[in-house]
Amino acid sequence: PPLPGAEVNAICEQAGKWQQGESDGTDSSDWPEPVNILHELSAPAFTVEDLPAVLAQYPAAYAQATGFDPSLPLSGAISVAAAALSDGFQIVGDSSSEWFTQARLWILAIARPGTGKTPAHKAMLAPLWAIDGALREAHAQALAAKTKDDPVPPKPRVIVTDTTIEALSDALIANPRGVLIADDEFESW
């Protein structure tokens, strides 16, 4: 229902005082600037300073050589480094409890076409693919050398792509230290 005129005037007067910081003793300048929630959103840039120097050298050099946004190779490098950690390393979530978790890192690069997501992704994964290839070669040699009665050694994996949940389960069972799931397209996962 409509408010009486006196009550509307009292509300307006109170609002005017509040805007000037007189209502409750606070200064309106303490309030943050309003944010336009309808503008295009973007995450803050991922910079070389966000990574340890030894880890940032290669992706920074790659970004400079290619002209791609440094966030792409930097985030790829940090994901490869995280995947290199064994799941045996655990993070203490709360020192007063017995809650532990393995380091898990999920990275999703979102950018317009032609920004270099795929080349940066491949370049940062190359060292991990080399390790994976060496492990597969050693596995093939072990299979060739085994006798008929020897048990089949589990297939080593460091990285998997375009996998199903079932195939991923098999890879994780055979590789308890963990694997990196690298999908070039998010819809693949």
Image (cartoon, rainbow, N blue to C red):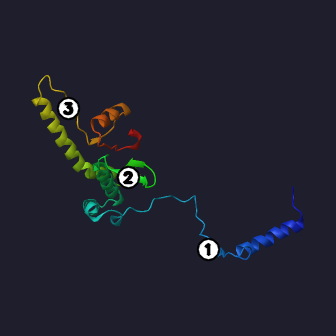
Pointer 2: residues within 10 angstroms few (<14), some, or many (20+)? few
Residue tagged 3 = 153
Q: Which residue is under mark 1?
A: 30
Residue 33 lies, in percent from the top left, at 59, 69
For the residue pair 107 and 81, the one nearer the viewer reads as: 81
Quarter of the N terminus within the rendering: bottom right
Q: Which residue is mark 2?
A: 91
Question: Which percent across, then down, holds residue 67?
Answer: 30, 61
Give me the C-alpha separation between circle 1 and circle 2: 38 Å
Disc marking residue 68: none
Disc 3 element: loop
- Residue 153 visible in image: yes
Q: What residue is shown at x 14% (from left), y 23% (from top)?
A: 149
Front of the two marks 1 and 2: 2
Instruction: Give me the residue at 15% from left, 26% from top.
Output: 150
Disc 3 packing (10 Å; few <14; some 14–19; many ≥20): few
Q: Amino acid at mark 1?
A: Asp
N-terminal label among 3 and 1: 1
Does the rendering let one see residue 66? no
Q: Quadrant of residue 9?
A: bottom right
Looking at the rendered image, the disc whose residue lies closer to the viewer, 3 or 1, is 3
